[in-house]
Every structure is written in C-alpha cells, then in structure tokens.
Image (tube, grey):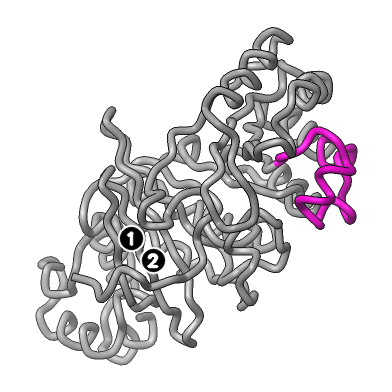
C-alpha cells in the first residue's frame, strides 16, 4: 500500500485512513468514501484487503462459525467465531499453520506443521468475522502454540483495539513454552495468559504433552508466577477431562495442592472427540470440580461451542467437510 501511495503521489496519511475503514469491517475499497475514486480503483486492483483466501465455512447449530483459510503460499489454517447468549462475540484465532508440539489429545498436533503465521495473517482471521458483525473478545487458542510465535502474536494484539477488542479481552494460551511466557511477561500489553495444563504431575503430563519433557511443571509454573507478579492478574488453567486418565479424585486433590488459589483459576474442558481418548462424563467432571472447590481452588466448566462442526477446543485440523463458502 505504501508503494502504491508513493507511486500515485498520495500523502502517507491515506494508509491510516484505509486501516480505519478495514478495522471497522469494510468489505471493499469502494466503501472508503474519504479516499479519491482513482486511488480506490488502484488499490482494488493492486492491494488485496486480506492475506487469506476463504476455502470453506461451517456453521454450528449453536451459532458458532468455523472458517478454513489458505494463506498466500497455500498453508491451511482455521479460525472460529463463538456467539454467546449474553451478547459476547469471541474469535478464536490461529498463530501457526499446524502445530509442532504434538499433544496427544489435540487434532491440530496430528497435522503436519507448516509455519508461523505473520501478524497480518493473524489479524485477517479476526477481520474476516469483523466484516460480518462486531467482535469484542479474541483468544489465541486455535492452531499452533502462540508463544512460539510471540512477536507476531503481540504485533497482532497491538492492533486488536482498533477492531473493538480491548487488550484485557484478549487471552493467549500456551502449553508451557517458557521463553514465550517470559517474553509475554516483558511486554507492556495487558493481555491475559491461559496455561494448558491437563495433568497435575510431570509423569502424566509428559504422557499427554511431550513438551513437558523440555519444560516440566516446576519451570512452567515459575514462569507463570513471573507473569502474574508483573501483571497482577490470575492465570487461567485449562484442563481437558479424559476419562479414567486425569479425572480421578486423587488427580483433583493433586491439582489443588499444586496451584496457588490466589494465582490461578481452573477451566475444566469437556473432551471434544479427536479419536485418541474417551471424555469424562458430566458427573465425573462435576465431582472433579467439587473437590477443587473443597480445597479452595476456583473452577468452572467450559461451555462447549461448535463440536458438531469440529470447531471446539482441540478439534481444529484444517478440514473442509462443510463445502464451499457462501
């Protein structure tokens, strides 16, 4: 865009005008009425509004929408819009095409890893849904490990308020990549941190998540404490519930002993089938939550969204079963 502006002799502030239109969900340059008509035509021909091409879109009975994109070099990635009854509109974005960390319960980890996404490619996922309706939350819980691509993730976060998403309504999830957590701690952006824990001890966690061999629990929790000390915010702990594997009463008691109730809030996640395990029953999940509560550790059960279109937590795998986009 800067090149086109220079070639046409336009002032540099035109780029800010274009971004203002794009951030509010404009679908074409033709709508940017404070730009000269000739410039609008030139931009339409030479500067695409998105770095991504929509390949397919699926819509769930609960209102969730999953979009499958291709990057300019053909890398697949997915993003999800979650609609809630209280009016919230949350977008789950990907930070990588695929994921190199191969967590055993996650469909994305079974994909071939492609590459890190650029800040533009991350933003364009949110902008895709912003063109349909207003959004107010963004979570980096899609494909990939965000803290392995932390510079691009933070660069995207800097722009999200222009789309209507405050920093405090943005959360970055990590499996425990310690250098990335520390990089996030050093950032001035007040975004939230969520830790994918899924086991209360190193032996079980390494079985589920090979990254634990590199960064065991003690190191990960120490990094989370450094984040909390700087941010003065609780860390959300994500814990997927797997039947007879990590959902026993002793696991709940071990988890309660592991986590400082002043520093963490637990989010219990019903397992969304990917073929690897059986999910815990609602009764077992409630028993687990009750034990945590008895030990003073706050815990909620995540509301599952988009399971019927494979858009729920752990299910993203760049599949196009839904057919072509509308």
State the separation of the CA atoms marked 2 and 1.
5 Å
Is residue 242 or residue 130 the one in the foreground?
242
What residue is rendered at 60% in x and 35% in y?
Answer: 280
Height in image: 196 above or below 4?
A: above
Q: Quadrant of residue 14?
A: bottom left
Answer whether residue 152 is visible to the viewer in this image: no
Residue that numbered label 1 is attached to: 127
Q: Do the residues labelled 2 and 1 touch (CB within 8 Å)?
A: yes
**Residue 195 image offset from top left, x and y in percent:** 68, 40
Please indicate whether residue 160 sits to the left or right of residue 47 in the image. Answer: right
Looking at the rendered image, the quarter that the N terminus falls into is: bottom left
Height in image: 254 above or below 21?
A: above
15 is within the stretch colored magenta: no
* Secondary element type, mark 1: helix
What residue is rendered at 30% in x and 41% in y?
Answer: 83
Magenta residue span: 197-221
209 is within the stretch colored magenta: yes
Residue that numbered label 2 is attached to: 124
């Amino acid at each position: 865009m800067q090149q086109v502006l220079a070639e046409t002799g336009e002032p540099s502030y035109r780029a800010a005008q274009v971004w203002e239109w794009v951030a509010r969900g404009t679908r074409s340059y033709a709508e940017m009425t404070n730009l000269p008509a000739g410039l609008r035509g030139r931009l339409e021909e030479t500067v695409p509004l998105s770095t991504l091409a929509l390949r397919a879109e699926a819509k769930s009975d609960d209102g969730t929408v999953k979009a499958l994109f291709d990057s300019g070099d053909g890398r697949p990635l997915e993003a999800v819009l979650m609609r809630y009854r209280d009016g919230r509109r949350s977008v789950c974005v990907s930070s990588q095409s695929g994921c190199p960390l191969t967590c055993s319960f996650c469909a994305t980890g079974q994909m071939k890893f492609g590459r890190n996404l650029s800040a533009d490619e991350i933003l364009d996922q949110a902008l895709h849904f912003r063109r349909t309706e207003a959004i107010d939350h963004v979570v980096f819980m899609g494909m990939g490990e965000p803290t392995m691509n932390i510079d691009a993730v933070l660069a995207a976060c800097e722009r999200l308020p222009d789309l209507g998403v405050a920093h405090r309504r943005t959360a970055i999830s990590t499996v425990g990549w310690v250098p990335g957590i520390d990089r996030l701690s050093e950032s001035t952006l007040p975004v939230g941190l969520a830790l994918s824990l899924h086991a209360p001890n190193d032996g079980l966690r390494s079985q589920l998540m090979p990254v634990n061999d590199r960064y065991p629990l003690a190191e990960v929790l120490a990094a989370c404490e450094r984040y909390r000390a700087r941010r003065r915010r609780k860390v959300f702990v994500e814990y997927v519930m797997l039947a007879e594997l990590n959902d026993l009463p002793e696991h709940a008691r071990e988890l309660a002993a592991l986590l400082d109730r002043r520093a963490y809030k637990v989010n219990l996640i019903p397992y969304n089938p990917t073929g690897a395990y059986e999910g815990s029953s609602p009764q077992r999940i409630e028993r687990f939550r009750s034990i945590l509560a008895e030990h003073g550790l706050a815990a909620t059960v995540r509301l599952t969204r988009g399971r019927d279109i494979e858009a729920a937590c752990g299910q993203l795998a760049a599949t196009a079963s839904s057919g072509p986009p509308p």
